[in-house]
Image: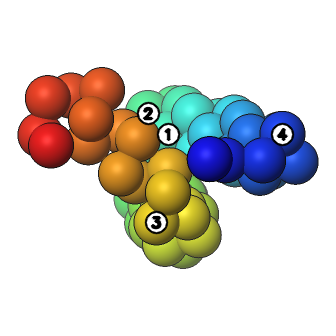
């Protein structure tokens, strides 16, 4: 079972991921877009294995 603290951490991380995705979409220069993309990849790498499993279940992949 995922602890409430993990849920809060996961929720904050997902908010940061969503924000970063918005920055990619609104970047004014290719350099800004690349920078935002690199940060988005870093944030994706921070997802916990439990969160990834939950997302896969939600999408019917498990």
**In terms of secondary structure, where does tag 1 sit?**
helix
Secondary structure at badge 2 equals helix
For the question of whether residue 10 can be seen, the reply is: yes
Q: Nearer the viewer, mark 4 or mark 2?
A: 4
Give the numbered dot on residue 4: 4
Q: Which residue is mark 2?
A: 25
Query: Image quarter for residue 42?
Result: bottom right
Mark 3 residue crowding within 10 angstroms, few (<14) / some (14–19) / many (20+): few
Q: Which residue is mark 3?
A: 49
Q: Alpha-carbon distance for marks 3 and 2? A: 27 Å
Looking at marks 1 and 3 on the same chain, the residue that comes earlier in the sequence is marked by 1
Q: Earlier in the sequence, mark 3 or mark 2?
A: 2
CA gap between label 4 and label 3 equals 16 Å
Q: Judge left or right: residue 39 versus residue 45.
A: right
State whether residue 16 appears in this view.
Answer: no
Q: Nearer the viewer, mark 1 or mark 3?
A: 3
What is the crowding at mark 2: few (fewer than 14 residues within 10 Å), some, or many (at least 20)? few
- Quick check: 34 above or below 12? below
Mark 1 to mark 2 CA distance (whole Å)? 6 Å
The residue carrying mark 1 is 21
The spot of residue 33 in percent (x, y) is 46, 55
Tell me which residue sits at (40%, 53%) in the image.
52
């Amino acid at each position: 079972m995922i602890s409430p603290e993990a849920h809060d951490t996961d929720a904050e991380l997902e908010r940061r991921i969503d924000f970063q995705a918005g920055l990619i979409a609104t970047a004014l220069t290719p350099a800004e877009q690349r920078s935002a993309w690199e940060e988005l990849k870093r944030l994706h790498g921070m997802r916990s294995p439990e969160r990834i499993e939950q997302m896969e279940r939600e999408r019917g992949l498990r």
